Amino acid sequence: QVQLQESGPGLVQPSQTLSLTCIVSGGSITAKGYYWTWIRQSPGKGLEYMGALGYSGRIDWNPSLQSRTSFSRDTSKNQFTLQLTSVTPDDTAVYYCVRGTASEFEYWGQGTQVTVSS
């Protein structure tokens, strides 16, 4: 059973950089066919795809967030990371890490609440 667990700060100040890590167990982040994805949901809004790291390390961006996002991974720890720069209160959301395939988002972390506030 694949499990994903997000970790990161619950509170970030405006203009700072948000960094979130997803620890994966039960499956390798280098296994072929999977995309290690970040999705968020802001209050009162739908789910927003932020981007993904493919199993080869190739990155798929959300164009609207590309200028502020970066993705990385540590294969030795089987984890991957999202960084979001210059955060504003509009970035307040529950952030999820997800394992996806070409056709679906299979496994989700429980989500972590991030609030941007001074």
Image (tube, rainbow, N blue to C red):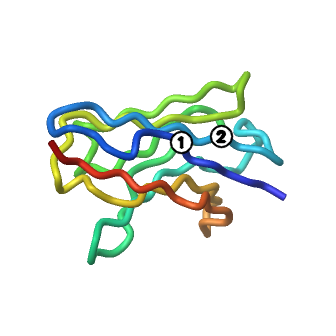
Q: Name which residue type carries label 1.
A: Ser
Q: Residue at 67% across / 62% down in the picture?
A: 107
Looking at the image, residue 1 lies above or below residue 28: below
Which residue was labeled with disc 2? 23
Q: Please state the total of marks drawn on the protein image.
A: 2
In the image: residue 43, left or right of residue 73: left
Q: Where is residue 98 in the image (x, y as percent from the top left)?
A: 58, 56
As rendered, which of 68 and 112 lies closer to the eye? 112
Q: Name which residue type carries label 2.
A: Ile
Task: Find the residue positioned furthest to the front.
Answer: 118
Q: Residue at 71% across / 50% down in the picture?
A: 33
In the image: residue 64, left or right of residue 9: left
> Considering the numbered disc 1 on the image, is that residue within a helix, a strand or a loop?
strand
Measure the C-alpha gap from mark 2 to mark 1.
8 Å
> In which quadrant of the rendered view does residue 3 lie?
bottom right
Q: Residue at 42% across / 49% down in the picture?
A: 51
How busy is the neighbourhood of tag 2: few (under 14 within 10 Å), some, or many (20 plus)? some
Picture quarter with the C terminus:
top left
Q: Position of residue 22 (x, y in %)?
A: 58, 42
In the image: residue 64, left or right of residue 5: left
As rendered, which of 64 and 84 lies closer to the eye? 84
Q: Where is residue 40 in the image (x, y as percent from the top left)?
A: 39, 60
Does the CB distance between marks 2 and 1 fall below 8 Å? yes
> Considering the numbered disc 2 on the image, is that residue within a helix, a strand or a loop?
strand
Question: Which of the two discs, 2 and 1, sits closer to the camera?
Answer: 1
Q: Earlier in the sequence, mark 2 or mark 1?
A: 1
Which residue was labeled with disc 1? 7
